[in-house]
Image (spheres, rainbow, N blue to C red):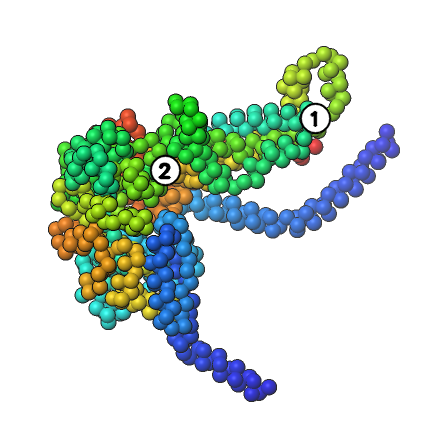
């Protein structure tokens, strides 16, 4: 009896004394549910499980919005996941402010994140009051026009590089029997297209005037009016079934040759690849359309909510370090079709479109920040509502939309 | 007389004693319910209303801003559109459900063959979740895959049935799905009501030579008042909380065409990180319930119940 008790207490004290040797389960919430995305996320899971006894517990929730609100609610409710995906933005800023996230700055300093993560705007949203609260894992950009080369050939027109050109060739594409613009009428897609039109018909300085400086004169000026007019003009070039359509269904219209082009982020490339098409041969990718090429630096990050259990915290740090290691970055981003956050990564598999993106990434003047970095989720939501209303009410004039836009900028937070 | 009075007092005495005893046990039995009711409804609702006067973003914070959130709420086009949508959707939904439910119940009341089969068939949609209902109807109303496509391929080229992609009609697309889902329940309630009507009344009406439809409309229907009220209350609750059907069918689109107040609240307290505004909207949803439906339910049920 005595012996048993001693053994038991020894075991307990051993367990208490060395919690770091204890294996931990880390639950990871993310919204990577499509085929290509699943492949990418299992790179993370496998690499993490290989590191030791800690286990990656996969918790995939369809749709970013849903996944993020589950993370938020669970963190607020005191039952946070071990790690969770967010976009590179201010979405998780309040969690960091309230001290609910693990500060990774010691690890970051040791590994030199600030030196190897490029461009530096990828890391900056993670930094809050000197602490580092998230790990950027990839770079995505929204400003791409995906084209079906054969449709353009059959319609006898050149692929447009600016919105002006697009509006010129669109009627000819329609006349040839194709839908000029494959479009998914969901709020976020309407908003994405609006932003592409905005940067594509203006420039980086103007973008910053609006979002960073909240310049009301610029918002009420003729250049902004032109943005609304150009965006409004696109309405006649989509098909009847657009409202509510998913982005990948719209991409599929381009792949199958029903439509000529689609405005979508670089994740659309995964769909073309999955259909066995070749970049630059079957499908084209045009940065913009835009007066000069611009890319937003967006992407996905992981946050690590604070945990009571020290063993989990140790595992969280291990996971953060793993996600940024060069070999994992290469494997993960090749599967995902996104660009790695560090330059010293083997990218022999990169296709023509990916190379275009990588080249632009080297040019600081071509990079600009998404509006989500300058204004909070609430203001962004208001803008999305306005864009969606304008897109769907043919009777609403560009002038009226601009008036409401000025109001939103005025009250932006 | 005297004896009668005695008996009466004795009876009253007995029953008061009995009632007191009953009250005590029922009090114990209903304590958990009272705690839940006060805890969930009163305290939580109070807390929500309190938050609506703050500038809370993602976290509840007590930085008071007075009626600012309400001012912003009522100057937000999306909210005003949501309220209008709810009024259109709600009134039509209730009317169509009541009419369709009543007609189905009358049909079954004719002692038709396969009554059980029909009853199950009519009630079945109600067993389906609103998300499934929404998705099924979304597919049927999709212009390039759904009913429109099928009929056009059969040769009727000009046929149009794709309400969900048209901002003017989308709300009616949702209405169709909602009525399809809920009218079965009304049918079940009404059928129970019809079966509860004394057969003597039917005989009397026959003797007087009143046509069947008039008997239904002017004699039987008024007798079914409690059933009507129950149906109405259930339908009203369904209207106020309409959320999942919209999310599954249109996601609020095209544009703001099918936005609803409940969706506004949930969007703002989750992804839009604006608890203050969301709670102001939630309070506005609670207000009509408290002001109109509360006293009315009290009058219909509680007061009548105690009188009986």
For label 2, count other residues whose C-alpha is less than 10 Å away and answer few (under 14), some (14-19) or many (20+). many
Residue extending farthest bottom: A3
Query: Camera-side residue: A85 or B140?
Result: B140
x, y (%) of residue B132? 49, 41
Judge left or right: residue A344 versus residue A240: left
- Residue B300 position, x and y percent, is 61, 31
Between residues A167 and A254, which one lies in front from this camera angle? A254
The lab-note entry on whether marks 2 and 1 share a chain reads no
Tally the marks: 2
The answer to whether the residues at label 2 and label 1 have Cβ atoms under 8 Å apart is: no
Residue at (21% x, 47% y) in the render: A281
What residue is disc 2 on? A244
Q: Is mark 2 on a helix, strand or loop?
A: loop
Residue at the image position 83 percent from the left and 33 percent from the top: B5
**What residue does disc 1 label?**
B111
**Which disc, if any, is residue A272?**
none
Q: Quadrant of the C terminus of chain B?
A: top right
Q: Is residue A404 visible?
A: no
The x and y percentages for residue A71 are: 39, 55
Q: Would residue A156 be found to the left or right of residue A329 on screen? A: left
**Looking at the picture, how far across and down is residue A169, in whole percent?**
18, 33
| Residue A243 visible | yes
Residue at the spot x=57%, y=50% of the render? B35
**Quadrant of the image occupied by residue A217:** top left
Question: Badge 2 sits on which subunit?
Answer: A
Q: Identify the subunit bearing mark 1.
A: B
Q: A1 above or below B2?
A: below
């Amino acid at each position: 009896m005595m012996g048993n008790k001693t053994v038991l207490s020894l075991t307990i004290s051993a367990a208490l004394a060395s919690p770091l040797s204890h294996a931990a389960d880390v639950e990871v919430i993310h919204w990577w549910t499509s085929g290509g995305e699943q492949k990418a996320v299992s790179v993370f899971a496998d690499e993490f499980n290989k590191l030791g006894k800690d286990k990656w517990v996969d918790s995939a929730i369809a749709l970013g919005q849903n996944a993020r609100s589950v993370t938020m609610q669970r963190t607020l409710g005191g039952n946070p996941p071990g790690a969770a995906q967010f976009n590179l933005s201010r979405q998780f800023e309040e969690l960091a402010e309230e001290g609910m996230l693990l500060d990774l700055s010691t690890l970051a300093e040791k590994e030199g994140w600030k030196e190897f993560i490029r461009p530096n705007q990828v890391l900056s949203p993670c930094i809050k009051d000197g602490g580092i609260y998230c790990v950027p894992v990839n770079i995505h950009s929204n400003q791409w026009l995906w084209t079906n080369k054969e449709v353009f050939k059959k319609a006898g027109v050149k692929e447009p590089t600016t919105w002006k050109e697009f509006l010129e060739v669109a009627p000819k594409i329609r006349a040839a029997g194709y839908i000029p613009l494959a479009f998914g009428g969901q709020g976020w897609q309407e908003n994405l297209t609006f932003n592409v039109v905005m940067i594509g018909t203006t420039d980086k300085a103007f973008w910053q005037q609006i979002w960073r400086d909240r310049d009301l004169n610029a918002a009420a000026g003729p250049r902004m009016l032109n943005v609304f007019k150009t965006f409004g003009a696109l309405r006649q070039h989509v098909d009847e079934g657009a409202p509510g359509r998913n982005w990948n269904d719209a991409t599929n219209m381009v792949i199958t040759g029903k439509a000529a082009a689609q405005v979508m982020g670089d994740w659309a490339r995964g769909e073309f690849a999955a259909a066995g098409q070749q970049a630059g041969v079957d499908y084209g990718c045009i940065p913009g359309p835009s007066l000069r090429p611009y890319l937003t630096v967006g992407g996905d990050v992981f946050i690590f909510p604070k945990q009571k259990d020290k063993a989990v915290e140790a595992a969280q740090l291990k996971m953060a370090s793993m996600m940024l290691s060069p070999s994992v970055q290469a494997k993960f981003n090749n599967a995902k079709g996104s660009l790695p956050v560090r330059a010293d990564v083997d990218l022999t598999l990169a296709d023509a479109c990916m190379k275009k993106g990588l080249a632009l990434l080297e040019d600081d003047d071509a990079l600009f920040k998404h509006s989500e970095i300058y204004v909070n989720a609430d203001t962004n939501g208001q803008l999305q509502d306005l864009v969606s209303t304008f897109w769907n009410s043919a009777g609403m004039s560009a002038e009226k939309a601009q008036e409401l836009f000025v109001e939103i900028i005025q009250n932006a937070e | 007389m005297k004896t009668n009075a005695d008996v009466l007092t004795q009876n009253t005495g007995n029953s008061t004693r009995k009632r007191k005893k009953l009250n005590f046990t029922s009090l114990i039995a209903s304590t958990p319910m009272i705690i839940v009711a006060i805890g969930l409804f009163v305290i939580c609702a109070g807390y929500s209303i309190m938050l609506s006067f703050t500038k809370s973003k993602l976290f509840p914070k007590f930085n008071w801003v007075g009626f600012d959130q309400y001012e912003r709420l009522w100057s937000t086009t999306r909210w005003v559109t949501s309220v209008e949508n709810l009024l259109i959707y709600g009134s039509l939904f209730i009317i169509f459900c009541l009419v369709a439910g009543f007609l189905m119940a009358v049909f079954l009341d004719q002692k038709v063959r396969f009554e059980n089969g029909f009853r199950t068939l009519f009630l079945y949609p109600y067993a389906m979740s609103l998300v499934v209902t929404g998705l099924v109807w979304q597919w049927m109303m999709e212009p390039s895959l759904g009913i429109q496509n099928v009929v056009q391929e059969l040769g009727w080229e000009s046929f149009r049935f794709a309400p969900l992609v048209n901002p003017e009609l989308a709300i009616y697309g949702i209405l169709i799905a909602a009525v399809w889902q809920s009218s079965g329940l009304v049918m079940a309630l009404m059928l129970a009501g019809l079966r509860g009507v004394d057969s003597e009344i039917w005989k009397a009406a026959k003797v007087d030579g009143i046509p069947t439809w008039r008997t239904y409309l002017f004699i039987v229907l008024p007798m079914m008042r409690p059933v009507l009220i129950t149906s109405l209350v259930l339908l009203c609750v369904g209207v106020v909380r309409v959320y999942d059907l919209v999310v599954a069918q249109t996601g609020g689109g095209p544009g703001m065409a099918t936005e609803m107040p409940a969706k506004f609240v949930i969007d703002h307290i989750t992804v839009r990180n604006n608890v203050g505004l969301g709670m102001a909207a939630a309070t506005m949803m609670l207000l009509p319930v408290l002001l109109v439906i509360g006293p009315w339910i009290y009058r219909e049920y509680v007061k009548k119940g105690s009188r009986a």
